[in-house]
Image: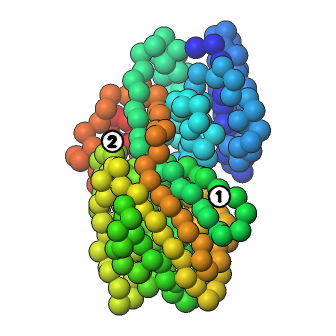
């Protein structure tokens, strides 16, 4: 590899420090390295030319932001964990030198994850497009009143949810917010995705597993401000009448890994409890 980007969590001092150590280590190996905050996505995108790998220093939230940077160019990500759970991160801070050297020698393997593509049509102005590695959420705002979300799948009416909101989640995101809302857990490599209501009131209460080629349309009706959240860090206000269309993206989230592929089901309980000493990779 000739050019690598390093994105770090800017509010964790240890992440900034470790990112500098990673940069120095790679530079000493003859690699061209650029360094940046994962919170400065547009600045990071301007550095992508000829970049072959993005290394993140932080936790899963840092990876979610890096995925937004990497998705269009399909650049793989390797995460160094300084967070709590580390579902998607690959390396611990004390092993990065040994494992990054192995990756530079071509010993890694590629883990591809399905992503979502969401289009927001507010009825005024251009349609906005977003990509999600975890989930797309349409939900009520600060006022504790339900919203009405008219849902259709492949053009066929499904139901009108009367709820706090609705989650559309990938397999990767199935262990996140969707799980808290009662959704099932999908294997990380699954291409199917989920549609799950948040605290529904006298409306369809069951989460659904949708085929990978499904197209979901959500039309919002509310008397109060609601919001759109993409991977928890793109957050936009929504007014009544907004339409959000979601489908599986043609682009995937790509992770370059060095640890052997762990048995997902046998390690699931430890992961959900946040244990970090599970053998093998952490996602």
Residues under numbered marks 1 and 2 in contact, where contact means CB atoms less than 8 Å apart? no
Query: What label sits on residue 191 in the rendered view?
Result: none
In the image, 92: left or right of 25? Answer: left
Residue at x 45%, y 83% (from the top left corner): 163
User: Does residue 17 show up?
Assistant: no
Secondary structure under tag 1 reads loop
In the rendered structure, the answer to whether residue 55 lies left or right of residue 38 reads left
Is 168 placed above or below 8 here?
below
Look at the numbered disc 2 and give the secondary structure of its residue: loop
Residue on which the image places disc 1 = 127
Is 178 located above or below residue 226 in the figure?
above
Q: Residue at x 63, y 39 (%)?
A: 69
Q: How far separated are the C-alphas under marks 1 and 2?
A: 30 Å
Numbered label attached to residue 189: 2
Q: Is residue 279 left or right of residue 240?
A: left
Residue 280, picture quadrant: top left
Where residue 188 sits, quadrant-wise, is top left
Please give the name of the residue rendered at 54% of the width and 65% of the height, measured from the top-left corner: 244
Question: Mark 1, mark 2: which one is toward the viewer?
Answer: 1
The residue sitting at 70% across, 58% down in the picture is 126
Q: Between 115 and 125, which is closer to the camera in this rendering?
A: 125
| Residue 130 coordinates in the image, percent (x, y) | 59, 52
Q: Earlier in the sequence, mark 1 or mark 2?
A: 1
């Amino acid at each position: 590899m000739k050019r690598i980007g390093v994105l770090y969590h800017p509010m964790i001092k240890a992440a900034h420090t470790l990112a500098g150590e990673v940069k120095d280590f790679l530079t000493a190996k003859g690699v061209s390295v650029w360094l940046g905050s994962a919170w400065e996505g547009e600045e990071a995108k301007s550095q992508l030319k000829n970049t072959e790998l993005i290394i993140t220093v932080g936790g899963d939230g840092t990876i979610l932001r890096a995925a937004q940077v990497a998705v269009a160019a399909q650049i793989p990500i390797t995460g160094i964990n300084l967070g709590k759970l580390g579902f998607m991160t690959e390396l611990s801070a004390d092993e990065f030198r040994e494992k990054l050297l192995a990756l530079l020698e071509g010993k890694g393997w590629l883990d591809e994850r399905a992503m979502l593509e969401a289009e927001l049509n507010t009825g005024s102005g251009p349609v906005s497009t977003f990509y999600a590695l975890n989930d797309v959420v349409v939900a009520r705002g600060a006022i504790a009143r339900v919203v009405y979300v008219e849902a259709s799948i492949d053009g066929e009416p499904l139901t009108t949810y009367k709820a706090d909101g609705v989650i559309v989640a990938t397999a990767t995101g199935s262990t996140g917010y969707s799980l808290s809302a009662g959704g099932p857990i999908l294997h990380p490599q699954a291409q199917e995705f989920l549609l799950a209501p948040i605290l529904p009131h006298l409306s369809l209460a069951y989460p659904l597993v949708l085929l990978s080629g499904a197209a979901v349309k959500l039309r919002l009706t509310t008397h109060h401000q609601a919001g759109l959240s993409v991977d928890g860090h793109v957050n936009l206000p929504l007014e009544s009448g907004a339409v959000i269309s979601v489908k599986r993206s043609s682009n995937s989230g790509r992770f370059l890994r060095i640890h052997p592929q762990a048995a997902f089901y046998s390690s699931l309980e430890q992961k959900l409890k946040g244990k970090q000493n599970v053998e093998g990779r952490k996602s």
